[in-house]
Image (cartoon, rainbow, N blue to C red):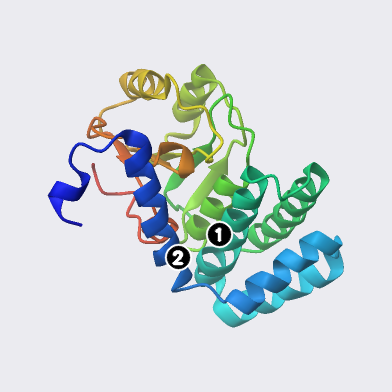
Amino acid sequence: MRPGKVVGLKEAELTSISDTLATKKEKTAVNQPQLDELINCVSNHDSKRLSEILEQALIQQGLNSFIIETVAPLIYTNGNKWAKGELKIFEEHFITRQLTQFLDSVNSKIPLVSNAKTVILATLPGEPHSLGILMLESLLRNKGIMVVNLGTEVPMDQLVLAYEQYKPGAILLSFSGSYNSNGLRIELLDLAQRLPDDIPVYIGGGGVKSMRKMPKQIIIKNQLKDVSELDINQTP
C-alpha cells in the first residue's frame, strides 16, 4: 500500500487492514470444501467424521502443510465465529478438545532425535488457549527439535526456572487473539532481562500481531510457516 494511505492511521485501523491482508493471504492455501466440512462437523458435534477428515488431510498433506493449511485455518475460522457470537460455548469446547486430542496423538508419534537442541513452549498467565503451542510443537518436533511444552499460563518465575533447568536454545510463547495484551511489553522486557542475551524469545499469535519495536532478543513471528523454517541455533 502507498505510505500516504497508512501513515497517520489509528492502531485499530491498521489492525483491520492487517487482518484483511492476512485473510486474503491465508485463503490461497486453504482447501475451502474441506474447511466447510470440518466446520459442519463442529456444528453437528460429529467427532467421528471430524477425526476421519483430519486423518485423511494429515496423510495427504504431510505434517507441516496439515498444520498450516488445515488446522490453522480451522482454528482461525472458529475464532472468528466465536467473536461474532456464531459459535456456542459447548461448540468451542468441542473443537478445542478434538484438536487437542488429535495433535497430542500426532506429536507423541514423532520420533525423538538424540542430542537434539531443546526449545521451551508456553503461554503466560491470562492465556489459557493451548492449541497455538500444540501446533508449534508439531512443527518443531517435525524438524527434529526436542520440545518441552510447559502448557498454559506459566508464571514468569517458573518460566525462568524452566530455562535454568533445560537450557533451551529458544523460548516460544503463543498469544491468541483474545489475549489481553495490556502490560505485555513490560512483562516481555522483564523476561528478557532475566535470560542470557543470546537466548531468543519468539512470540506469535493474534494477541501480538500489532506489537512493534521490541528489543532484538524478542522476535515476533507472525506466520506459522516462519516456525517451520526456524533455526534455533541462530543468535537474534
The residue under the point 47% across, 73% down is 29
| Tag 1–tag 2 contact (CB < 8 Å) | yes
Mark in the foreground, 1 or 2: 2
Q: Residue furthest bottom?
A: 60
Q: Residue at x 61, y 49 (%)?
A: 79
Q: Is residue 68 visible?
A: yes
Q: Is residue 190 above or below residue 220?
A: above
Q: Position of residue 114 (x, y in %)?
A: 50, 56
User: Can I make out residue 112 in this image?
Assistant: no
Quadrant in which residue 101 is drawn: bottom right
Distance of label 1 from label 2 (alpha carbons): 9 Å
Residue located at (72% from left, 73% from top): 37
Residue 17 placement (x, y as % from top left): 35, 50
Mark identifier at residue 26: 2
Q: Amino acid at mark 1?
A: Ala
Along the line of sight, the residue nearer the viewer: 44 or 162: 44
Above or below, 12 against 47 in this view is above
- Which quadrant of the rendered structure holds the N terminus? bottom left
**Residue 133: image x %, image y %?**
56, 46
Q: Is residue 117 left or right of residue 68?
A: left
As drawn, is 1 to the left or to the right of 117? left
* Label 1 crowd bin: few (<14), some (14–19), many (20+), radius 10 Å: some
Q: Position of residue 199 (x, y in %)?
A: 32, 35
Q: Is residue 34 left or right of residue 232?
A: right
Which sits earlier in the primary sequence, circle 1 or circle 2? Answer: 2
| Secondary structure category for the residue under label 2 | helix
Q: Amino acid at mark 2?
A: Glu
Task: Give residue 72's mark.
Answer: 1
The quadrant of the rendering that contains the C terminus is: top left
